[in-house]
Amino acid sequence: MTQAAELAQRIVVLHREPGYLRLELPAEICGEVALTAIEQGMKTLAGLSSAAVDRGWKRISIRYDAQALSPAQVARHLFSLLPGLPLEAEAESSAAEPEVPPSFNLNNGIQPLLDKVKAVIIPAAPPPEGSLQARFQPMVESALTEKAITNFFNDIVAFYLIRVHWDLITKRWLQNPVANSNAWLTVFYLVFLLVRYRKTK
């Protein structure tokens, strides 16, 4: 068995869903040069929208067009990059360096951070069918998405604004809506934006 084949066998699938893969990489290919080569090499695959390497966790998150690519095609492309990666020198240098704490880069939104949370609280192996964990795991996965978190905080802001302006709403705006038409227009516009955001995401 070649070294590249052995490395390919040690790549672990942490999470998979249509259009998304999160993989844990072997330590030998987690040097800075090797990870940069993987990140750039993956982006050359047609149909792949993003490939982000988390150097602290030694993981790669891959987003792709599920209509154009299958997980096997994405995996084969990743495996094809392994033979050309610098292994020994990078492995030695990374072993000598202190462990880098996990980084939380929010330039690409909060989804990479949520993926890290999922990896911690959701086991890689599927839970036993019919167990309590099997029932709650889909709920946890759906809650730990960028859309769900954004909707949650939008609702919190909306309830906060209602609470702050409750006295004005009940004692002035409802009693004299014409005189406070600007306030009502603002309320309707904010509700419109909130509803449109939920429908378009």
Image (cartoon, grey):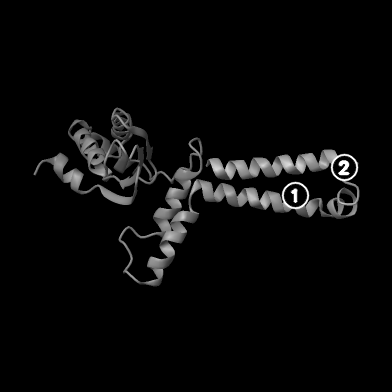
Residue type at numbered disc 2: Asn
Q: Residues within 10 Å of mark 2 (few under 14, many from 20)?
A: some
**Mark 2 or mark 1, whichever is nearer to me:** 2
Instruction: State the image coordinates of residue 22 (x, y, percent, origin top left).
Output: 34, 46
Going by the image, does 46 lie left or right of 188? Answer: left
Establish if 168 lies above or below 85.
below
Instruction: State the image coordinates of residue 185 (x, y, percent, origin top left).
Output: 78, 39
Q: Do the residues bearing badges 2 and 1 touch, measured as CB atoms within 8 Å?
A: no
- Between 8 and 197, the one lying in front of the other is 197
Residue type at numbered disc 1: Leu
Image quarter for residue 61? top left
- Between 132 and 22, the one lying in front of the other is 132
Going by the image, does 199 lie left or right of 90? Answer: right
Q: Residue at x 31, y 46 (%)?
A: 23
Quarter holding the N terminus? top left
Give the residue at mark 1.
Answer: 161
Give the residue at mark 2.
Answer: 180
